[in-house]
Image (tube, grey):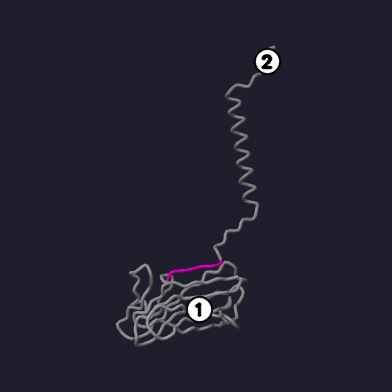
């Protein structure tokens, strides 16, 4: 017995195209409607190159080495650098801050860093300062952050003062 109506290849191709298109569209709609969270890890390490010189430091900052930034002043004068802190959750708090520095001059200022917490409107601030131990070489400036007031939805900045030829290699933050 012969079937009177047999779909031809053109009809099959059309039905297949419509089916695939509908499945693709459904996948896009479902993918867009579900919650997707893309956050960087809470533990962040940024290079010293993320820090910006303040004032005259912009004239003497050496960015030529990818390992660090350096206060290349010829004078025994300290210069300031501001390093941004990236936050994933503005309700979270900093658990850990460490700045990796190097003191390259036996005379003059040693690396000193301050973590600033600033409220949304900028009217309230808190800070904690750590001074490197005297002597030449690498220093990890670690902040205890005990009693440190952290403002929801505000921001943090790390400010470092570097003496002649001192360097910032990197800084690390961790928030909960």
Is disc 2 placed on a helix, strand or loop?
A: loop
Which percent across, then down, holds residue 20?
60, 36
Is disc 1 placed on a helix, strand or loop?
A: strand
Q: Earlier in the sequence, mark 2 or mark 1?
A: 2
Q: Residue at coordinates 56% horizontally, 83% vertically from top-left? A: 126
Q: Is residue 85 left or right of residue 32?
A: left
Q: How many marks?
A: 2
Q: Residue at coordinates 44% horizontally, 75% vertically from top-left? A: 100
Image disc number at residue 21:
none
Q: Nearer the viewer, residue 19 or 83?
A: 83
Per the picture, the main secondary structure of the magenta-coloured stretch is strand
Which percent across, then down, holds residue 101?
42, 77
Q: Residue at coordinates 63% horizontally, 35% vertically from top-left? A: 19
Q: Is residue 40 left or right of residue 5?
A: left
Which stretch appears magenta?
42-47
Give the CA distance from mark 2 to mark 1. 84 Å
Q: Nearer the viewer, residue 50 or 112?
A: 112
Q: Is residue 110 above or below residue 33?
A: below
- The quadrant of the image that shows the C terminus is bottom right
Question: Hey, which quadrant is residue 134 in on the image?
Answer: bottom left
Image disc number at residue 142:
1
Q: Is residue 74 above or below residue 171?
A: below
Q: Residue at coordinates 62% horizontally, 44% vertically from top-left? A: 27
Q: Nearer the viewer, mark 2 or mark 1?
A: 1
Which percent across, then down, holds residue 147?
60, 83
Residue at which label 2 appears: 4
């Amino acid at each position: 017995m012969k079937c009177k109506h047999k779909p031809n290849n053109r009809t099959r191709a059309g039905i297949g195209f419509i089916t695939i298109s509908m499945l693709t569209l459904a996948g896009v709609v479902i993918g867009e409607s579900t919650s997707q969270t893309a956050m960087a890890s809470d533990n962040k390490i940024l290079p010293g190159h993320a820090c910006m010189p303040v004032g005259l430091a912009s004239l003497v900052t050496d960015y030529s080495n990818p390992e660090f930034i350096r206060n290349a002043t010829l004078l025994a004068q300290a210069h300031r650098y501001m390093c941004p802190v990236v936050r994933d959750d503005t309700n979270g708090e900093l658990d850990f801050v460490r700045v990796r520095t190097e003191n390259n001059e036996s005379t003059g200022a040693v690396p000193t860093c301050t973590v600033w917490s600033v409220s949304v409107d900028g009217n309230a601030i808190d800070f904690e300062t750590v001074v490197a131990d005297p002597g030449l070489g690498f220093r990890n400036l670690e902040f205890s952050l005990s009693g440190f007031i952290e403002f929801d939805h505000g921001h943090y900045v790390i400010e470092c003062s570097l003496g002649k030829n001192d360097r910032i290699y990197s800084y690390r933050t961790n928030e909960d």
